[in-house]
Image (tube, rainbow, N blue to C red):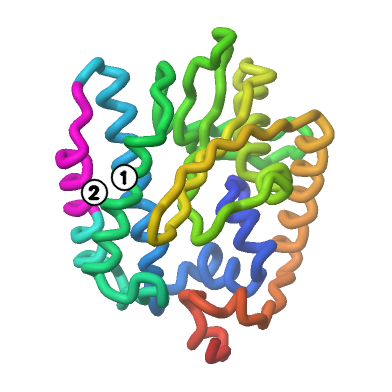
Amino acid sequence: MITVWSYSKLSTWTRCPAQFRFRYLEQAPVESVGAALLLGSAVHHGVQLIHSRRKLGLAVGLAEIQGSVTSFLEASVRHAEAPVEYPKTHTTLSATLDLSRRLIETYLAQGPSGEVVVTELELTHPIAWLPGLKLTGVVDRIESDEQGGLRVVELKTASKRLSQAELDASDQVTIYALLLDLAGYPGVKLRYEVLTKAKRPHLLTMDTVRTPNHETRLLERIDQVSRAVASGVFPRVVAPQTCRGCAYRKRCGVSG
C-alpha cells in the first residue's frame, strides 16, 4: 500500500496507472533510461552547486561548474541501470554533454543572484485530512524575495517554452506550498525557472500563485488516486505521448 505521496507518484498515476504499478508496486527493473532525465538531473546538480557556492560567498566559475556537470552526466550514463535512449534533438552522449554546457552557461548569464536561504530542502508531513497518508517533496531552492519574505523556486528543463497556464496548473509547487504551510510557513511566493533545451537555450522566470482552493483540489486528487491504487485500478494509457520514452514498454506489451 502506498502511504507516502509525492509529485512523482501522483503525476505517474495520472499519466499512466499501469506505469505506476510497474514502477512503485512491482518495482520492476526499467528497460531503458531517458537521456533527457539524466540531462535534467545533471543540470539540477550544476544549478544547486552554483547556489550553494553563492550562499557560502564563494566565486562561481563557469568552467568549474560545467566540468562538474560533465562529470555528473558521464557518471550517470556509465552507471545507468538500463540502456540510455537519446532523443532526436541530442542523439549522442557528446551532443548531450554539449547541450548541458550551454544550459549552464545560459543559467549563469541570465540566472538570478538573490539571497539563497536553503537548497534541496526535503519536507515530509502527515496529511491530517487523509489519515494514514503523508505528503513529501524536495524543494529545489528557497530564497529571500524583494520584500524580505520567502520564495520557493523550482527549476525545470524543457524542450519548449512552457505557458503560464501550464505552470499555474502544475501540482508540483502546490505540493511545496502545502508542505511549507503545514511546516508553519504559509503564504510563500512561488516561482518557476524554465531552461529551454534549444540550440540557443533561454531561461524563463515565471511566477505563479496557489490558493487554498488549489490545495483542497490537490488533497482530493491524492485521496482519489490513493483509493484507486488500493482498489487495484491500473488501466493502460496507450498513446504516443505516453508510451514514447516509457521504461516499461516490453512489460506492458506496447511497442511505443
Element at badge 1?
A: helix
Left of 150 or right of it: where is 85?
left
**What range of the chain is rendered magenta?**
59-72
- The numbered mark at residue 236 is none
* Principal secondary structure, stretch drawn in magenta: helix
The one nearer the camera, 170 or 131, is: 170
Q: Position of residue 13 (x, y in %)?
A: 65, 63
- State which quadrant residue 215 falls in: top right
Element at badge 2?
A: helix
Q: Are marks 2 and 1 in contact (CB under 8 Å)?
A: yes
Q: Which residue is mark 1?
A: 104
- The numbered mark at residue 69 is 2
> For the residue carrying disc 2, how many other residues have a C-alpha within 10 Å: few (<14), some (14-19), or many (20+)?
many
239 w.r.t. 56: above or below: below
Nearer the observer: mark 2 or 1; the answer is 1
State the residue at coordinates (37%, 40%): 107
Q: Position of residue 84 (x, y in %)?
A: 32, 74
State the residue at coordinates (40%, 29%): 119
The answer for how far apart the CA atoms under marks 2 and 1 are is 8 Å
Circle 1: residue type: Ile
State the residue at coordinates (40%, 71%): 89
The one nearer the camera, 245 or 133, is: 245
Left of 207 or right of it: where is 83?
left
Magenta includes 64?
A: yes
Magenta includes 56?
A: no
Q: If you read the primary sequence from the N terminus, does the residue marked by circle 2 or circle 1 appear first?
A: 2
- State which quadrant residue 209 falls in: top right
**Residue 117 seen:** no
Tally of numbered discs: 2
Q: Position of residue 62 (x, y in %)?
A: 21, 38
The one nearer the camera, 195 or 53, is: 195
